[in-house]
Image (cartoon, coloured by chain):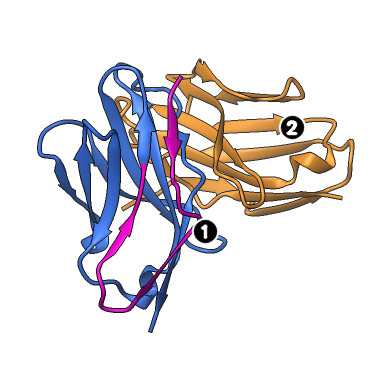
Chain colours: A blue, B orange
Amino acid sequence: AQSVAQPEDQVNVAEGNPLTVKCTYSVSGNPYLFWYVQYPNRGLQFLLKYITGDNLVKGSYGFEAEFNKSQTSFHLKKPSALVSDSALYFCAVRGEGTGRRALTFGSGTRLQVQP
Amino acid sequence: AAGVIQSPRHLIKEKRETATLKCYPIPRHDTVYWYQQGPGQDPQFLISFYEKMQSDKGSIPDRFSAQQFSDYHSELNMSSLELGDSALYFCASSRFGDTQYFGPGTRLTVL
């Protein structure tokens, strides 16, 4: 079975400061990892993914994520937070060789960026 | 770029009624997925279809059924609705099992 843990229900950061949203995973084989963002009353928007290759993945809106196999983590980062980044962030995992199967999501982390 | 389309966006039903949710995937995407997101919860996988055949099944109640049609659109049929079925229902699509792109969701309220 695969699982994702997002240990923080909420992260607060001041505008202009760097942000990190944490994610750890458990999966058999090599993981396929994703970050999605959800704004109020909206769908899930894809931010970035790790399949293979460089451990630092760059995505949309200036976000990036660092894959760490030894720590089974995939933390989302941004060098300088914007107020408009305030939203709910979900980390998700899919096992290798399960291309058309479900994503397993973490419980979500609410990011609050203060002006 | 074209996105996943879901209809209706909002639906209000009474207990024991039925509901049908529709999903139109991104053009040339071959797989459709359905997820349910309860209030304050993470999305839970219900069911998926690849090339009109059921591909994977999650925690979909027996009261729910789904199918994918020849034009690749999918419908989620929900019968004997219960209060606990009130949730946001997402459809996602992907091509060749790659990244899943989500629609805006249908908010179902059961009274």
Task: State whether residue A87 is above or below residue A32.
Answer: below
A35 inside magenta stretch = no
Task: State whether residue B32 is above or below residue B6.
Answer: above
Element type where label 2 sits in the image = strand
Callout 1: chain: A
Residue at the image point whose x is 14% and y is 40% from the top: A55
Image coords of residue A106 (percent x, y): 47, 41
Q: Which mark is residue B78?
A: 2
The kind of residue on which mark 2 rests is: Met
> In the image, is A90 to the left or to the right of A74?
right
Range covered by the magenta-colored residues = A1-23
A5 inside magenta stretch = yes
Q: Which residue is mark 1?
A: A42
Image coords of residue A47 (percent x, y): 31, 51
Given this view, does label 1 or label 2 mark the residue nearer the observer?
1
> In the image, is B92 to the left or to the right of B65?
left
Residue at the image point whose x is 32% and y is 30% from the top: B95
The kind of residue on which mark 1 rests is: Arg
> In the image, is A99 to the left or to the right of B53?
left
Element type where label 1 sits in the image = loop
Residue at the left extreme, as displayed: A54
Residue at the image point whose x is 26% and y is 78% from the top: A16
